[in-house]
Amino acid sequence: MLSYVQVFRRSLLISAAIFVMDFVLALALTWLGFALTDILGNLLLLETATFFVIGGILDFGTSAGIIQLRKLILSSKEGFSMAKRRESERNALVFVIAGVMLLSIMIVLALFDLSVL
């Protein structure tokens, strides 16, 4: 099971890697005449929303109601396990925290863009 420190480290690693890739892509697109902050902000917004959705799906997928629905519809033999539930919550937390980190970077970027005007 992941500890909260491991969750934070993974989130930091994911968000840093995504930010670096986005920055390089936005920097490359400036050669085509696009504004760096516009492209970077749009990419961060898209990935933030994606991380929140992934985190929600990971958390929702192991809830007791979904497990019962799988049993009913798919005749699944898998039962509800609190240990599995906690593990999926921690995995979902990795993506949610990474999304929050990217969201905060996007807010700082927007404030910087406003101060330039």
Image (cartoon, rainbow, N blue to C red):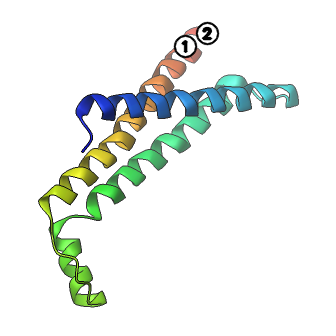
In what element is the residue under mark 1?
helix
Mark 2 highlights which residue?
Answer: 116
Question: Which label belongs to residue 28?
Answer: none
Specify the farthest residue to the front: 1
| Identity of the residue drawn at 44% across and 46% down | 51
Q: Nearer the viewer, residue 47 or 66?
A: 66
Mark 1 highlights which residue?
Answer: 112
Left or right: residue 31 versus residue 73 is right
Image quarter for residue 7? top left
In what element is the residue under mark 2?
helix
| Identity of the residue drawn at 20% across and 57% down | 85
Residues under numbered marks 2 and 1 in contact, where contact means CB atoms less than 8 Å apart: yes
**Residue 24, above or below 95:** above
Q: Position of residue 55 (x, y in %)?
A: 36, 50
Q: Position of residue 1 (x, y in %)?
A: 24, 45
Image quarter for residue 23? top right
